[in-house]
């Protein structure tokens, strides 16, 4: 039997050898930069048809990678999509069916028992960080550091003043890890700066960087404006711009510049060909933005509420200038990252999303048939192939039963022609599927 000092030395050598092996294996892993815009519409950027707002850096990602013409946010508002992103499953399963509001939900959030992509990648040797908008719980007990992110700087509410970082209820909301720590700077610039610093610091190990931007969510403030909000006072207090369209443009332009700086740094450090960059929005635009030909806006079950711009960039892996019409959702990001990193999905993780890697690498043009669902404040939707069922409550007195409509998106992307009467069998199939889906999470308490 080894004596205690020798045993300790032996175990130390064994552990060191194991750790070195893990590190060497992890060094071969790809890096990830996941960028989420806020309230950015399907038609708000150049590569998706916008001619008014210059977005050369996002356009360059699309030109050098793959453009998703049928990418969707899991929710039509903020919190639900973010829950689906980090958990890889329908947000209703974790109780985030609606917005975790600054006014009514300050003591709730994403349950720490939920397993996120950051936790799984961290266990696989990745450095993880998030800079920007969380919106999955206001208390530190629900914050990013609890959910696998080694570093976090940003805010936890739905939006903050871009300069004073006060939320809509008048609370200070700029965090460094678990502590409130006020900091000067335009939110978009700070998110970019922290992201660049993280990449520099972790250039020699695999990393996963999540950059959820505030742009282009209100308050509408460009980089040369000043604060609208003051601590202790709910809502905007002074100086709000009237030329919202111009402010909107400035906000997107600054986000685009930051994305350009991020990609430029990856190139400078020689990391570009080993880094998958993903860009998309958390929901469609509100009435201030551009959803192209799509019907509806943020919060709606129609395409304008949840079909969003999506771009993937990975030189050497993704064919430049490629495009796909595969229907993808935010919840597909989690399994995609694990697949790209060749990390096995832990047995305790139950994913609803599917890996997009076969699509990104050109090995497949389809994910197979799947029925997809949206449950939003103004209604519900189910999608199978080109068929989309929408159920919503009509406005006005006496409107009790929901209105059910069916659209063939291949012929009617604008959802103008209800064909439900001509296809009762498809209506029934999708209604039944929608009810089964709702029953699968019916006992989970929803924040809405």
Image: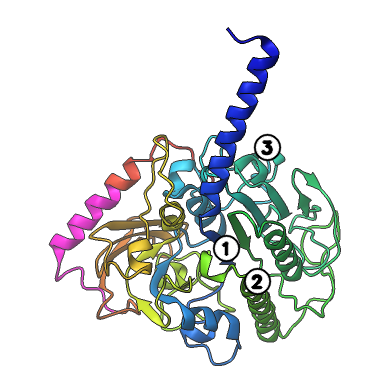
Residue 292 percent location from the top left of the image? 45, 83
Q: Nearer the viewer, residue 53 or 239?
A: 53
- In the visual, does 257 lie left or right of 124? right
Residue 447, quarter of picture: top right
Q: What residue is shown at x 15% (from left), y 67% (from top)?
A: 423
Residue 276, magenta (yes or no): no
- Cα distance between the residues tagged 2 and 1: 9 Å
List the single residue furthest toward the top: 1
Q: Is residue 355 left or right of residue 291?
A: left
Q: Is residue 423 above or below residue 121?
A: below
Mark 3 or 2: in front is 2
The residue pinned by badge 1 equals 33
- Measured Cα–Cα span from mark 1 to mark 3: 25 Å
Name the spot of residue 407 as percent of width and height, x first: 26, 72
Q: Position of residue 224 (x, y in %)?
A: 82, 80
Please tell me which of labels 2 and 1 falls first in the chain. 1
Contact (CB < 8 A) between labels 2 and 1? Answer: yes
> Which residue sits at x=39%, y=35%?
347
Residue tagged by mark 2? 262
- Tell which circle, 3 or 2, labels the residue nearer the N-terminal end: 3
Which secondary structure type mostly characterizes the magenta part of the structure? helix
The residues tagged by marks 3 and 2 sit, at their Cα atoms, a distance apart of: 30 Å
Q: Residues within 10 Å of mark 3 (few under 14, many from 20)?
A: some
User: In the rendered structure, which segment of residues is drawn in magenta?
Assistant: 417-435
Answer above or below: position of 291 versus 10: below
Per the image, the residue denoted by label 3 is 141
Q: How is the image coloured?
A: rainbow
Q: Is residue 418 magenta?
A: yes
């Amino acid at each position: 039997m080894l004596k205690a000092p020798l045993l300790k030395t032996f175990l130390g050598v064994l552990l060191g050898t194991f750790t070195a092996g893990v590190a060497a294996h992890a060094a071969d892993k790809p890096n990830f930069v996941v960028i989420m815009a806020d309230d950015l519409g399907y038609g708000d950027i150049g590569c998706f048809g916008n001619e008014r707002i210059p977005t050369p850096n996002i356009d360059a990602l699309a030109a050098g990678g793959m453009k998703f013409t049928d990418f969707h946010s899991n929710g039509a508002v903020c919190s639900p999509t973010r829950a689906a992103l980090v958990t890889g499953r329908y947000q209703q399963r974790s109780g985030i069916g609606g917005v975790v509001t600054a006014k009514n939900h300050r003591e709730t959030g994403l349950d720490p028992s939920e397993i996120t992509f950051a936790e799984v990648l961290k266990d696989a040797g990745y450095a993880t960080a998030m800079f920007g908008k969380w919106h999955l719980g206001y208390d530190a007990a629900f914050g990013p550091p609890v959910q696998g992110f080694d570093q976090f700087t940003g805010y936890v509410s739905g939006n903050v003043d871009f300069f004073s970082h006060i939320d809509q209820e008048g609370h200070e909301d700029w965090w460094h890890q678990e502590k409130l720590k006020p900091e000067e700077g335009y939110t978009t610039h700070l998110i970019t700066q922290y992201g660049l610093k993280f990449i520099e610091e972790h250039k020699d190990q695999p990393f996963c960087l999540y950059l959820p931007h505030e742009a282009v969510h209100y308050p509408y403030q460009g980089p040369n404006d000043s604060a609208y909000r003051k601590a202790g006072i709910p809502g905007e207090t002074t100086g709000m711009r009237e030329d919202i369209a111009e402010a909107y443009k400035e906000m997107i332009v600054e986000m685009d510049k930051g994305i350009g700086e991020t990609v430029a740094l990856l190139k400078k450090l020689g990391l570009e060909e080993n880094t998958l960059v993903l860009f998309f929005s958390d929901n469609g635009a509100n009435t201030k933005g551009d959803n192209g030909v799509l019907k509806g806006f943020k919060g709606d079950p129609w395409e304008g509420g949840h079909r969003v711009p999506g771009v993937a960039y990975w030189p050497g892996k993704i064919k430049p200038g490629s495009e796909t019409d595969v229907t993808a959702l935010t919840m597909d990001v989690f399994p995609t990252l694990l697949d790209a990193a060749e990390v096995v999905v832990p047995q305790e993780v139950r994913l609803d999303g599917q890996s997009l890697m076969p699509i990104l690498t050109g090995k497949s043009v389809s994910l197979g048939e799947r029925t997809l669902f949206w449950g939003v404040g103004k209604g519900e939707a189910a999608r199978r192939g080109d068929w989309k069922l929408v159920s919503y409550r009509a406005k006005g007195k006496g409107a009790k039963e929901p209105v059910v409509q069916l659209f063939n998106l291949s012929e009617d992307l604008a959802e103008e022609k209800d064909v439900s009467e001509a296809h009762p069998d498809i209506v029934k199939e999708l209604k039944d599927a929608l009810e089964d889906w709702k029953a699968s999470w019916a006992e989970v308490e929803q924040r809405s």
